[in-house]
Image: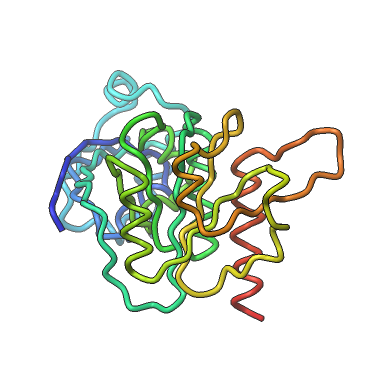
Amino acid sequence: MQKVKINKYTVYGINNVTSLLQSKKYDIDKIYIIKDSNSYLNKNLKSKLKNENIIYCDNKTFSNKFSFKHTQGIAAIFKISYLDFMINSDNKNLCYVIIDQMNDPQNLGQIIRTCECAGVDGIILPRHGSVHITDTVIQVSQGAFFYLDFFIVSNLNNAISYLKDNDFWIIGIENSIDSEKWDDIDYKGKVGIVFGSEGSGIRRLVKKSCDFLATIPMSGKTNSLNISAAVSAILFERNRQLLK
């Protein structure tokens, strides 16, 4: 794999910083802790703080540096090295979630949490026209971010072609009369599942690259689900099939 970009991010709160420490995937720059705060007194967190660069400070110094709410007195600055997309697992039930044209960081954070809970192997995001990883995205994921692989690709169709060359089926989730019912699709084996934005869906050329299109029929007056809700429905249908 080739490193393509390194960015710094900040995460706060006991659970998020604990997840960061447990993942061991990222280089931690500094950890700031308010003296006598909940984080300072937390024995579980303290047991995981070993070789990190820890700065103990008072409440005023911490507040001047970080404007977040509900920090529990701890914030960590860490680095992410984004990698070229490459499959390095022999798992016969690999699953990658592919996000096309999504711009809401709150939605992406929720999707990351769902993907981690559902056992997804990684998330693929386009370099252009989509939200990327931000402090908000990481925070909303509530620690799930640190256990998933992320890939930023210049061209989604090339990434999909690479998956197909490695025996993946590509399934697009699309509200369309030409789509099959969501629970009639076989999600077992190696799959890439494409989700588009709520407004415009999956782009035409990306949709054309899909082997199957699936839809979740609506029974109410609203004609589509929030994308994070659709991701939950599809991924846990996949889990149901795998467990069955």
- Identified at 60% across, 53% down, the residue is 213
The quarter of the picture where the C terminus appears is bottom right
Q: Is residue 64 above or below residue 175?
A: above
Q: What x and y, as percent, mark residue 48?
A: 29, 60
Locate residue 30 relative to residue 95 in the image: left or right: left
- Identified at 21% across, 52% down, the residue is 84
- Identified at 38% across, 21% down, the residue is 67
Q: What x and y, as percent, mark residue 3?
A: 14, 49
The quarter of the picture where the N terminus appears is bottom left
Locate residue 29 relative to residue 177 in the image: left or right: left
Q: Nearer the viewer, residue 82 or 35?
A: 82
> Number of marks in the image?
0
Q: What x and y, as percent, mark residue 49?
A: 25, 55
Locate residue 97 relative to residue 33 in the image: left or right: right
The color scheme shown is: rainbow
Residue at the right extreme, as displayed: 220
Q: Is residue 159 above or below residue 221?
A: below
Q: Nearer the viewer, residue 118 or 233?
A: 233
Q: Nearer the viewer, residue 147 or 227?
A: 227
- Which picture quadrant has residue 212? bottom right
Q: Is residue 63 above or below residue 125?
A: above
- Identified at 65% across, 46% down, the residue is 229
